[in-house]
Image (tube, coloured by chain):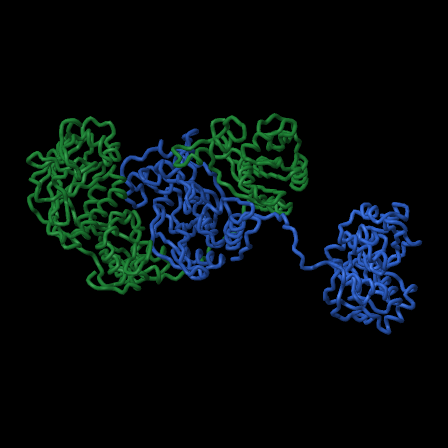
């Protein structure tokens, strides 16, 4: 059996008093009330003590108590004044010296006489007072006041006979003390506890520690120590955790999906030739999307030479008259100057388009994730820049069904099961397909990725006769669903509070 | 439609003609059609397509024109101004407010799509009753001719119209600085129209007008004819009669509109392969008929007949899509392709991911800002003179005038908006920057980070730099430098043997004031693209 230092002291006190209220016990043992409570609880758990609740009176200080405690009761102040005057003085001189109110003085005088502290005599005309000797024996009232001066409430039961007399006397005087009911815990030594207390000096002491220090570990002293238990449910300080941006998390997730489906990631520059952005994708030069109103053109450098001169020629012919693609083309005159302009890419299809040219007629699966731009004002649903994911499959046997199958699998892995495909239009694909997915949580269909098979007017000039399946879509849109956001600006607001406290969302 | 499909059926099926549902309200469906199919921009076109895919009415709708002896003479003066014109007369339109609204909406859509905002094609609709044939298309000097424009009360010259009327200011630039303006006038020299700007009040069309004269002018004759065809076939679908106009230019005569069908040959195997669906010849023909085309088969070759309103079909691939639409996209079963590929992410993506994890582990919050920026944000607030930036043309917002050359300004802005948040604050961003160097653009991936709290300082970011350099194994020296955004003596350039690739330091109090920050900030920015890796 090992006990802590506090428990040891508690048992030592209890061996003398057998039983005590918890607060009083702690005080006598010289330990804090909280610590005593835990120590006693442990002793009670091991049946060394038993704890009972009891309702009792305790004595509270009244309004006049503080003055009485500091300066003494009026009778004491009168005796003190008399002593200062040489132990014998005329009554009026004592009254002046004591500086008490008339009521206090006359009441105090009465008690001082009753206590045999002074005597009154009238040898001549004036009333004289003589201090008895010794006049300093404390009265019962004073003993009680001394007892109550501590911070701990004193119980009626704890008072000695003379203190009880003092209480009796003080209760009859104005506002020095009063009685109040309270519930207390009485700690009593059990038989076993008593036996333990008899040999308590020999019981090894278990020290109590707050922190487990390296010192304790290294020296092995931890064996002699018990750790003060904590308030396990106490509120904590906010932790400054590091986190990734929600868009980053989604990008990583999307990348992982395509990699796991056998797609190789690719990338391309943000500043692109209009040629690769539009012309190579068979977007006519007078297409509204190519206006300054919609596309960011660079001021300086404004143009760049296109290296692939053979390709330029094929693209020019395809636009003007269809070249050998079997198309009618757009007619009119195609301008090289227009194609040499530099833009901030408007879609990631420019990256996959370049890829088709590089790879040629080989089975190939690739994807890209990147930033795109369009000349827009910032609103709750539009931004001037956005992230896109885009992918292609080059295969002799690729078909519309394969395109649908790929996208369906992508959506499934993102967590959407119900998918709808319907005919749509993009300048560079035919057939073209639009998709929407059903979001259970919102109870609605949401349009996501657009897709199609690259037109022959796109692929043939790039040197590929095989079908090229292509799809692409905005990442912010998926993020808005994932994170329950209905204002796209939220994603770029970067309020640290939101980023720190954003809930983790699984697919 | 000739029948009443249930509302539920309509909502369910209508997207499969190739339109998107914009909204569905009780008793109202709003659809958005695609710009390649302006013929779906009017209720009759939608009904035609819908009846097709639901197999209620399939096959080609044929259109014909009657001869009413209408003639349009083209003067050679229009050649340098707006050279081409076509015309039609349409009678017995079952006109009411609703039909009028639809027809005008279609006219406007044609202007925007095929017409390229009236530049290529513009359409004038006139009350036939007040027009005296033959009409004439000619060009005149800006100040000479005057007429009362539509919705106006007084007569204005062409010049005044371009200056005074909103539509004149909007479409006037199409005419540029031409010294002649095109006009359509009737045989009594009354001005009907000033294309591509405005019609005259004289020929106003309202809900009582049942007979129309239509003029279409522009720069591209095939597109002019496409637009006219779409408009008159839509009116014919309403039940109107179409009369052609004999357009005479020089010695040539052209009857417009020409509502005959076009033919295109398509290989059946090509269709099956691309769709991935096995189809018998007859099935393909039925699908095409459901898309309101005509078709017949000779062996593996299909001869497809294309109605005059289908201006979008320019290659056999467009026929493939019509087969798919006729078949029904909802019936096409998705299939996983067998194409083999090795899944792999880019090395740069892997590096970014590792850096991200390290920063995350070091207690940094990732932020993501736009790469478009302004001179104010990138330079002025940082006490810098603008340099090395790439600027864009005509941004709609001044927030988007340049592309950022560095990220630290964006991080300071994040700290500004997050001032009420608990300190210390540690943030980072991995992102693109673009600079102009030697006449070309240089795109780089940057890592930028900022630390702020009451005792934040140089050593905080230097510790991070040392950590990064040892973990990612690159050599770095810090070289003293002068930089107006930072406190002198507490800012350094990151250099390797060969080049500089970043900066770190304590942000100057003047800059902090610009961002209303009252805690010290230490920053680091380095180019990942230039990391001198061992």
Q: Quadrant of the N terminus of chain B?
A: bottom left
Residue A12 rendering spot, x and y as whole percentages:
88, 64
Q: Quadrant of the C terminus of chain B?
A: top right
Residue A120: name its quadrant. bottom right
Horizontal side of residue A69 vs B114, given as left or right: right
Name the residue rendered at 59%, 27% in the picture: B483
Residue A369 rendering spot, x and y as whole percentages:
48, 46
Residue B82: name its quadrant. top left
Q: Is residue A26 visible?
A: yes
Chain letter corresponding to the colour blue: A
Up the image or down, A445 lies above or below A272; here it is below
Chain letter corresponding to the colour green: B
Looking at the image, which is closer to me, A115 or B236?
A: A115
Horizontal side of residue B420 vs A86, given as left or right: left
Residue A408 rendering spot, x and y as whole percentages:
44, 58
Q: Is residue A353 visible?
A: no
């Amino acid at each position: 059996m090992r006990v802590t230092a506090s428990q040891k002291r508690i048992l030592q006190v209890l061996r003398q008093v057998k039983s005590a209220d918890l607060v009083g016990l702690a005080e006598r043992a010289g330990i804090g009330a909280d610590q005593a409570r835990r120590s006693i609880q442990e002793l009670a758990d091991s049946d060394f003590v038993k704890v009972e609740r009891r309702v009792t009176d305790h004595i509270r200080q009244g309004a006049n108590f503080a003055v009485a405690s500091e300066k003494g009761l009026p009778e004491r102040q009168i005796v003190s004044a008399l002593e200062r005057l040489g132990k014998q003085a005329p009554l009026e001189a004592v009254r002046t010296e004591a500086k008490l109110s008339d009521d206090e003085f006359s009441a105090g005088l009465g008690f001082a006489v009753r206590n045999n502290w002074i005597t009154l005599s009238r040898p001549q005309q004036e009333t004289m007072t003589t201090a008895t000797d010794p006049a300093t024996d404390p009265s019962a009232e004073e003993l009680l006041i001394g007892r109550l001066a501590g911070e701990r409430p004193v119980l009626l039961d704890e008072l000695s006979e003379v203190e009880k007399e003092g209480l009796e006397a003080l209760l009859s005087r104005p506002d020095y003390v009063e009685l109040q009911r309270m519930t207390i815990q009485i700690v009593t030594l059990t038989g076993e506890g008593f036996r333990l207390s008899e040999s308590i000096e020999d019981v090894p002491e278990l020290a109590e520690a707050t922190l487990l220090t390296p010192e304790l570990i290294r020296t092995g002293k931890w064996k002699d120590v018990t750790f003060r238990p904590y308030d396990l449910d106490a509120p904590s300080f906010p932790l400054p955790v590091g986190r990734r941006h929600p868009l980053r998390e989604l990008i990583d997730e999307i990348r992982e999906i395509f990699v796991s489906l056998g797609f190789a990631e690719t990338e391309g520059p943000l500043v692109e030739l209009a040629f690769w952005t539009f012309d190579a994708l068979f977007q006519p030069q007078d297409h509204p999307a190519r206006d300054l109103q919609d596309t960011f053109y660079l001021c300086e450098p404004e143009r760049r030479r296109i290296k692939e001169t053979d390709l330029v020629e094929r693209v020019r012919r395809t636009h003007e008259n269809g070249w050998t693609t079997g198309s009618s083309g757009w007619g009119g005159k195609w301008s090289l100057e227009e194609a040499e302009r530099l833009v901030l890419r408007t879609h990631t299809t420019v990256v996959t388009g370049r890829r088709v040219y590089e790879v040629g007629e080989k089975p190939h699966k690739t994807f890209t994730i990147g930033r795109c731009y369009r000349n827009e004002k910032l609103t709750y649903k539009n931004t001037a820049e956005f992230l896109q994911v885009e992918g292609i499959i080059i295969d002799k046997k690729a078909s519309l069904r394969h395109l649908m199958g790929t996208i369906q699998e992508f959506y499934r892995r993102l967590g959407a099961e119900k998918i709808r495909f319907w005919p749509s239009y993009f300048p560079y694909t035919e057939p073209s397909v639009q998709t929407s997915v059903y979001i259970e949580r919102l109870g609605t269909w949401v349009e996501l990725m657009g897709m199609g098979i690259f037109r022959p007017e796109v692929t043939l000039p790039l040197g590929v006769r095989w079908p090229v399946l292509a799809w692409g879509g905005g990442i912010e849109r998926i993020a808005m669903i994932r994170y329950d956001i209905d204002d796209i600006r939220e994603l770029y607001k970067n309020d640290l509070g939101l980023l720190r406290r954003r809930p983790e969302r699984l697919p | 439609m000739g029948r009443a499909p249930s509302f539920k059926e309509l909502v369910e099926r209508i997207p499969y003609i190739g339109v998107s549902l914009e909204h569905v309200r009780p008793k109202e469906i709003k659809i958005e059609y695609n710009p390649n199919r302006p013929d779906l921009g009017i209720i009759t076109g939608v009904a035609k397509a819908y009846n097709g895919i639901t197999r209620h009415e399939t096959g080609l709708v044929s259109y014909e024109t009657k001869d009413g002896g209408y003639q349009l003479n083209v003067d050679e003066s229009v050649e340098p101004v707006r050279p081409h014109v076509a015309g039609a007369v349409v009678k017995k339109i079952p006109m009411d407010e609703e039909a009028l609204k639809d027809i005008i909406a279609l006219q406007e859509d044609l202007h925007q799509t095929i017409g390229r905002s009236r530049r290529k094609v513009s359409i004038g609709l006139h009350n036939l009753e007040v027009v005296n044939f033959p009409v004439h298309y000619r060009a005149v000097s800006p100040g000479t001719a005057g007429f009362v424009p539509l919705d106006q009360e007084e007569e204005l010259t062409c010049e005044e119209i371009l200056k005074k009327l909103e539509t004149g200011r909007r479409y006037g630039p199409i005419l540029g600085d031409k010294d002649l303006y095109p006009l359509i006038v009737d045989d009594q020299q009354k001005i009907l129209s000033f294309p591509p700007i405005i019609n005259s009040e004289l020929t106003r069309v309202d809900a009582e007008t049942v007979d129309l004269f239509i003029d279409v002018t522009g720069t591209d004759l095939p597109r002019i004819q496409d637009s006219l065809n779409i408009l008159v076939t839509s009116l014919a679908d309403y039940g109107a009669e179409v009369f052609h106009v004999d357009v005479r230019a020089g010695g040539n005569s052209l009857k417009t509109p020409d509502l005959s069908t076009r033919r295109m040959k398509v290989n059946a195997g090509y269709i099956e392969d691309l769709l991935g669906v096995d189809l018998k010849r007859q099935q393909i023909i039925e699908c095409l008929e459901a898309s309101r085309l005509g078709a017949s088969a000779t062996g593996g070759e299909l001869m497809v007949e294309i109605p005059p309103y289908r201006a979008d079909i320019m290659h056999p691939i467009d026929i493939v899509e019509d087969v798919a639409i006729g078949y029904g996209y909802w019936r096409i079963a998705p299939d996983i392709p067998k194409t083999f590929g090795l899944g792999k992410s880019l090395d740069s993506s892997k590096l970014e991911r590792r850096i991200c994890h390290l920063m995350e582990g070091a207690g940094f919050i990732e932020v993501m800002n736009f790469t478009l920026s302004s001179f104010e944000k990138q330079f002025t607030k940082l006490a810098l003179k603008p340099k090395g930036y790439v600027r864009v043309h005509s941004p709609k917002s001044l927030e988007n005038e340049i592309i950022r050359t560095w990220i630290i300004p964006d991080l300071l802005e994040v700290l500004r908006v997050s001032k009420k948040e608990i300190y210390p604050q540690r943030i980072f961003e991995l992102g693109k920057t673009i600079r102009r160097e030697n006449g070309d653009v240089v795109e780089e991936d940057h890592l930028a980070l900022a630390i702020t709290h009451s005792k934040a300082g140089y050593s905080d970011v230097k510790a991070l730099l040392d950590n990064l350099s040892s973990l990612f194994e690159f050599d770095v020296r810090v070289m003293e430098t002068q930089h107006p955004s930072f406190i002198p003596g507490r800012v350094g350039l990151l250099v390797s043997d060969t080049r500089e690739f970043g900066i770190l330091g304590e942000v100057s109090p003047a800059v902090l004031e610009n961002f209303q920050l009252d805690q010290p900030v230490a920053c680091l920015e380095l180019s990942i693209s230039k990391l001198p890796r061992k």
